[in-house]
Amino acid sequence: MITDSVSIVASGHTRFGRLDGQTLEDLIVEATREALEEAAVEAAEIDAVFLGHFNSGMVTDGFPASLVLQADSALRFKPASRCENACASGSAAIRSGAAELVLVVGAEKMTSNSTSAVTRALAGAGYQNDPQEAALSFPQQFGMAARQYGERYRDPLGAMAAIAVKNHGNAMSNPLAQMHREMSLEHCNTVSESNPLIAPPLRLSDCSLISDGAAAIVLASAKRARQFRRSVAIRAMAQVNDFLPLSRRDFLAFEGPQRAIRSALEQAGVTLADLHFAEVHDCFTIAELMIYEAMGLAPKGEGFRALEDGTVLADGRLPVNLSGGLKAKGHPVGATGVSMHAMAFRQLTGNPMGIALQQPEFGLVFNMGGMAVANYASVLQAERA
């Protein structure tokens, strides 16, 4: 558990997207240098470095932890470790940080591979010892979840389309987002040549993007955090892991995310009513819909109500994915967890990347690896003088 003894004091963030002219090393260096510059600390002051990076053969940089040292020669000889937990690798890196001053970087280079190659690489985060599960891509697994949701509760496709519209609209204000293109509800809720089925019933508009990018944050102990101009306390960070085989659990129960979020809120001593925004893991729109229910915004099978009553919209009681989310901001998998925390840090310190809230105090971050296998929930609180 991370408690209020740790604060985020600086962040760095590259643009997300198809970054053909930049290598994984370039991305790591760019985000690292920005975070160190914002923190106004010398690299020599950093006690440890953690890198969130999934890879799974997508790049040849098989030993990337020390690539962070390329950002500043004063980082040489600092302990540096790579953390991997599928799409939650970035959050795993944050949770590993425990020292006076820690640099956490998340990075992934994906677009130099074909879509089919990336799909195969990501599928490696699923259960491989069951031929039926091993044969399913993640779009197919989440497509199966959407079908089962419809059979057990109600057709989720309209709500999924509304989530895509919301997140693309939010991304229009984020200059670092991969996709700046507003989507209409009609487009997202219709199968067409420009919005084909990817893994029925998932349409292209229901799927997050293949991305390149990096993000970085600097973590400080409570004592060190007082020396910085801006800081955001990590009041709680909960990790819950579930069985890897889907056959061992009822996926629609979404118990891992629910337990992680509930635990983080309890540890932080806050409720949903205290939160001002959330950044959550919308790898597919059905995932965000189910996260509403895991958060407690609506009962099981009724996540659509959080959209219909406006709760999760930008001007709602609890805006979700003001950054554009994975759906439109982009999803370089190893960078995603760090990016979420960097975006939340900037929102809470009055320097948001995009839509600004009026003096928010609490934010929730939920990052998920695989089919709700590795679940990380953080509660962040602005620290004001």
Image (tube, rainbow, N blue to C red):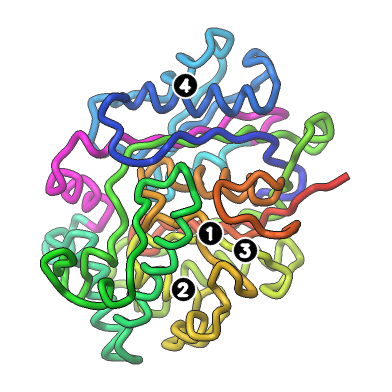
Q: Which residues are magenta?
A: 98-127
Q: Residue at x 48, y 80 (%)?
A: 307
Whole-angstrom CA distance, mark 1 to mark 4, is 29 Å
- Mark 1 vs mark 3, CA separation in Å: 8 Å
Dot 1 crowding, Cα within 10 Å, few <14, some 14–19, many 20+: many
Instruction: Residue 246 in the image: state x and y as whole percent.
Output: 28, 69
- Tell me the kind of residue under disc 4: Val
Task: Give amino acid for label 1.
Answer: Leu
Q: Which residue is mark 3?
A: 277
Select label 1 or label 4 by which is in front.
1
Considering only order in the chain, which callout, 2 or 3, is on the residue closer to the N terminus?
2
Identity of the residue drawn at 19% across and 55% down: 128
Tell me the residue at 65%/13% (across/down): 44
* Disc 2, SS: helix
Name the N-terminal-most of marks 1 and 4.
4
Q: CA distance from mark 3 to mark 2?
A: 22 Å
* Amino acid of disc 2: Glu
Q: Residue at x 42, y 87 (%)?
A: 301
Residue for badge 2: 255
Locate residue 385: give its quadrant.
top right
Q: Nearer the viewer, mark 2 or mark 4?
A: 4
Disc 3 vs disc 2: which is toward the camera?
A: 3
First along the sequence among labels 1 and 3: 3
Residues at discs 2 and 1 in contact (Cβ within 8 Å): no
Asked whether 217 or 206 is in front, the reply is: 206
**Tag 4 or tag 3, which sits nearer the N-term?**
4
Q: CA distance from mark 2 to mark 1?
A: 25 Å
Question: Which residue bears the numbered disc 1?
Answer: 322
